[in-house]
């Protein structure tokens, strides 16, 4: 049996992380009642957004539901027949850069957004296939390519009430009529002359389109904005740094931990005026809990990366906000990485699930952070219930659950002019933007991961608007074990991996899991794979031609059949060596990632393609 | 009596000479003593200054500390979107280019632009080894510029609309 070659248990990890297991046990004891929680694990856990709220034939937003589960309630394809999957349709997007988007399905159509120049294709779903119906070219400013840190990616559109919403690299949000591709409105939100871009997939909540900016490597100031879905008018904008009035912190703000309480911490936790160029961008996936009426979004790294230029906690960067969608006002905040040292953006997705923990069902969010910990957080209060390493970590020594603070290891702290070696995880983290999937059936979180460490040297950097504001040279390399990627099933109640598959390259694609208990993901050498969601046993794979870094989706076609769709097209930060023709003779090329990907050009050519699969 | 006149003339002439001497001394103090950077590619001082400017103006962030590329294209390979000569590169840095290269003309003097352009050429081994820099203040970023093999130069056909 090819069962879980990289099967990782707590004890199996002892070789590389001797301290991880005892501390995890002590946290378990403190949380109490492990056996009770295990006994209750059989209780039906639900996602915040009842999956039935989204029709089975649709995949209307990047993560399908606002709980961010990426779970398709379809059973046609299962562990017994997945091996018979066939490609039934393919379409070349004509774009050579990294394709990170999810194909969006709604209203009998499929919508695909390409990387810059952000062309949108509208396909009609027809029996047995899909067919191109319209094309929309927004023609974003060409100069925006020069302020995109990590390839010129786009993470896809959102569909609601006959409209398609998407963002352009040059900072616009655009609404199209879904049936015709006609432009309804376009709103300019970002300013590329300041280094701002937009790469994220918008989320529609209560007739509001929620959008955040990118540019944390260019000295921008992070924000999230809400636009009126009908008109494109900006209803509110909340900044991630600066005075409380700008962050939309008011009387309703009740952070769980004392270190997040106090007036204008977004100013006072920075050197004078550094918050104006301090990052905290909002480029990850957004979640929404309709019952609590809270939107959850991460904030990215503080800028510059050189931490000595910004003493202080650097609030509200590298953390998570819970906000009211109607007003934007902040309800709580938690900082994954206070005074971030290694570019551990806090924007990874937050998956909203209800779990039996400590003898009762709790509304939690699951968050696998760049810093290498998988957090279980009470999503009503912001209390961290557990934080366990899901990858090899030597930059920190766990999270103090009393204060909520991450414990840094001072030996890995950057210092100007000093080379710090073997920083694990590397800046892309144990997991980057590539989103996980949650199955309410298996109670597992399916995690696409990388296994990377780095050497780093920081330097003093000047802020020149529209140029990189980083001050760190990196060389990234494979982590312990020599493999660079992993696809794992995480059990959030037992707080360990159930199984794991090692991959040669970072697994930079999103995850998908279905009610047929099949999990899907792609690899950077072009394989799109199906595995048994319960055991991790490989079921099927398809060679896409170029590396897969997109987000797979599944929907029911007009003929009633289940389809699986994904974009191939290598790129993104790890794939920039191919998409951007980088020269890896310079190990700092591509922010140091090219160094770890020297063999990618031989394994994957460029080029974007939409693939649709079904059973014969 | 008449001797006053020659005296006055002498005084006037002396005063004039003194004034000229003083003024020319002032002018001399204002003169800028620096390498003209007319041929920065033949001058190790200029290319090393260019290397400093490459970091000071965040060129390294976009093009890699060793020129391997990042947000922007590699400068260490054989492909040139907008030309590989010193004048081409000066124009690229000074005026910017439409696919994302910002204009630095308002931030750098002409001689600095030429120093920087000369250094950019060293990244692909275009300069003599006794002129190209050989030391790094940053983490290892590939072969020292002075030891790089000279790359052939060709236009980059992969970039559509590369020409302004």
Image: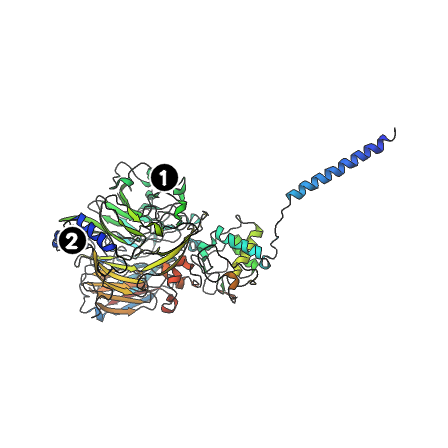
- Labels 1, 2: one chain: yes
Name the residue at 24% across, 57% down: A437
Density class for disc 2 (Cα within 10 Å; few <14, some 14-19, many ≥20) is many
Residue beneath label 2, please? A45
Residue beneath label 1, please? A267
Above/below status of B34 relative to B68: above
Q: Is residue A524 left or right of residue A513?
A: right
Distance from the alpha carbon under mark 1 to that under mark 2: 40 Å
Residue A264 visible in this rendered orientation of the protein: yes
Q: Is residue A608 left or right of residue B137?
A: left
Circle 1 sits in a helix, a strand or a loop, which is it?
helix
Count of numbered badges drawn on the protein: 2
Q: Which of pointers 1 and 2 indicates the residue nearer the eye?
A: 1
Where's residue A248, x and y in %? 31, 40
* Disc 1 chain ID: A
Q: Is residue A130 left or right of residue B45?
A: left
Residue situated furthest top in the rendering: B1
């Amino acid at each position: 049996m090819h069962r879980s070659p990289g099967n990782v248990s707590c004890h199996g990890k002892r070789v590389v992380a001797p301290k991880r297991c005892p501390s995890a046990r002590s946290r378990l004891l403190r949380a109490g009642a492990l056996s009770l929680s295990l006994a209750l694990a059989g209780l039906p856990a639900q996602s915040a957004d009842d999956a039935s709220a989204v029709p089975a034939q649709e995949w209307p937003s990047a993560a399908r539901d606002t709980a961010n589960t990426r779970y398709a309630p379809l059973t046609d394809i299962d562990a017994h027949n997945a091996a018979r999957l066939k490609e039934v349709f393919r379409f070349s997007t004509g774009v050579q850069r990294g394709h990170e988007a999810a194909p969006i399905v709604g209203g009998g159509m499929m919508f695909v957004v390409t990387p810059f120049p952000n062309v949108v294709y509208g396909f009609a779903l027809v029996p047995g296939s899909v067919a191109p119906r319209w094309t929309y070219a927004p023609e974003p400013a060409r100069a925006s390519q020069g302020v995109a840190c990590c390839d010129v990616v786009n993470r896809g559109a959102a569909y609601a009430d006959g409209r398609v919403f998407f963002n352009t690299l040059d900072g616009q949000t655009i609404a199209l009529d879904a049936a015709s591709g006609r432009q309804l409105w376009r709103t300019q939100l970002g300013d590329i002359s300041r280094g701002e871009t937009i790469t994220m997939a918008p989320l529609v909540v209560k007739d509001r389109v929620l959008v955040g900016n990118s540019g944390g490597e260019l000295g921008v100031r992070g924000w999230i904005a809400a636009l009126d879905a009908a008109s494109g008018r900006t209803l509110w904008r909340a900044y991630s740094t600066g005075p409380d009035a700008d962050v939309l912190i008011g009387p309703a703000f009740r952070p769980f931990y004392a270190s997040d309480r106090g007036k204008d911490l977004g100013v006072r936790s920075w050197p004078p005026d550094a918050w104006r160029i301090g990052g905290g961008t909002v480029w990850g996936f957004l979640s929404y809990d309709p019952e609590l009426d809270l939107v959850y979004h991460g904030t990215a790294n503080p800028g510059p990366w050189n931490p000595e230029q910004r003493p202080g906690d650097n609030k509200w960067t590298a953390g998570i906000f819970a906000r009211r969608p109607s007003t934007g006002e902040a309800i709580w905040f938690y900082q994954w990485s206070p005074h971030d040292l290694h570019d551990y953006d806090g924007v990874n997705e937050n998956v909203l699930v209800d779990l039996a923990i400590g003898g009762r069902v709790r509304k939690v969010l699951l968050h696998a952070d760049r810093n290498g910990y998988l957090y279980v957080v009470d999503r009503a209060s912001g209390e961290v219930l557990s934080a366990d390493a899901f990858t090899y970590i030597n930059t920190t020594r766990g999270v103090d659950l009393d204060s909520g603070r991450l414990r840094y290891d001072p030996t890995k702290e950057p210092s100007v002019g000093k080379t710090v070696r073997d920083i694990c995880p590397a800046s892309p983290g144990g997991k980057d933007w590539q989103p996980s999937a949650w199955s309410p059936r298996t109670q597992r979180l399916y995690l696409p991961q990388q296994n990377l460490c780095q050497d780093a040297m920081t330097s003093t950097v000047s802020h020149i608007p529209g140029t990189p504001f980083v001050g760190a040279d990196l060389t990234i390399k494979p982590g312990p074990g020599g493999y660079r990627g992993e696809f794992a099933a995480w059990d959030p109640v037992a707080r360990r991996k159930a199984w794991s598959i090692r991959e040669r390259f970072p697994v930079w694609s999103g995850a998908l899991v279905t009610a047929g208990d099949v999990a899907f993901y792609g690899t950077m050498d072009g394989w799109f794979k199906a595995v048994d969601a319960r055991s991790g046993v490989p079921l099927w794979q398809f060679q896409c031609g170029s590396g897969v870094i997109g987000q797979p989706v599944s929907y029911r076609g007009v003929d009633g059949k289940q389809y699986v769709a994904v974009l191939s097209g290598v790129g993104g930060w790890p794939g920039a060596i191919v998409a951007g023709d980088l020269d890896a003779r310079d190990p700092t090329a591509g922010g140091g990632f090219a160094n770890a990907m020297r063999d990618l050009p031989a394994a994957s050519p460029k080029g974007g393609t939409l693939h649709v699969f079904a059973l014969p | 009596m008449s001797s006053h006149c020659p005296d006055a003339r002498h005084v006037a002439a002396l005063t004039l000479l003194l004034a000229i001497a003083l003024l020319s001394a002032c002018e001399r103090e204002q003169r800028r003593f620096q390498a003209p950077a007319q041929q920065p590619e033949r001058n190790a001082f200029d290319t090393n200054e260019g290397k400093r400017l490459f970091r000071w103006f965040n060129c390294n962030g976009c093009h890699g500390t060793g020129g391997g590329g990042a947000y922007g294209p590699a400068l260490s390979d054989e492909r040139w979107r907008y030309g590989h000569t010193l004048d081409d590169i000066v124009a690229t840095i000074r005026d910017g280019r439409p696919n994302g290269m910002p204009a630095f003309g308002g931030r750098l003097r002409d001689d600095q632009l030429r120093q920087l352009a000369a250094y950019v050429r060293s990244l692909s081994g275009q300069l003599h080894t006794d002129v190209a820099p050989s030391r790094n203040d940053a983490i290892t970023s590939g072969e020292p510029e002075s030891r790089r093999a000279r790359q052939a130069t060709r236009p980059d056909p992969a970039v559509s609309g590369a020409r302004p």
